[in-house]
Image (tube, helix red, strand yellow):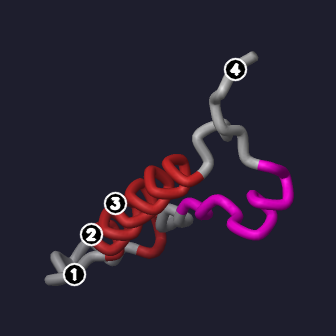
Amino acid sequence: MSTEYLPLPSAIADDPPPVPPEPPLPSDCCESGCPICVHDLYAQELDAYRQALADWLRRHPGAS
């Protein structure tokens, strides 16, 4: 018998996985060299999502 901890479905329901950010549409960028482009913001959101997902997977090691 495995001693690996598998989260109960209710545990995941109480702590749902993070949702990835939506990538910007091609029309969202004006291509004028803004100091903070929508692509920069998306990259920051994607980094935050990846960290949140890694944290969530540590809390729910049996989830995929």
As shown in the figure, which amino acid type bears the numbered disc 4? Ser
**In this rendering, position of residue 34 left or right of residue 6:** left
Q: What residue do we see at 71% from left, 39% from top?
A: 6
Residue 43 painted magenta? no
User: What residue is at 85 percent from the left and 60 percent from the top?
Assistant: 10
Q: Cβ–Cβ below 8 Å for labels 1 and 3?
A: no
Disc 3 from disc 2: Cα separation: 11 Å
Q: Nearer the viewer, mark 1 or mark 3?
A: 3
Are there few (<14), some (14-19), or many (20+) residues within 10 Å of tag 2?
few
Asked whether the beta carbons under mark 2 and mark 1 sit within 8 Å of each other, the answer is yes
Q: CA distance from mark 1 to mark 3?
A: 16 Å
Q: Earlier in the sequence, mark 4 or mark 1?
A: 4
- Of residues 47 and 16, the one nearer the viewer is 16
Check residue 40 in the rendering and tell me which mark sits there, or answer none: 2
Q: In which quadrant will I find the C terminus?
A: top right
The region drawn magenta spans 8-20
Q: Horizontally, is 53 left or right of 16 in the view? A: left
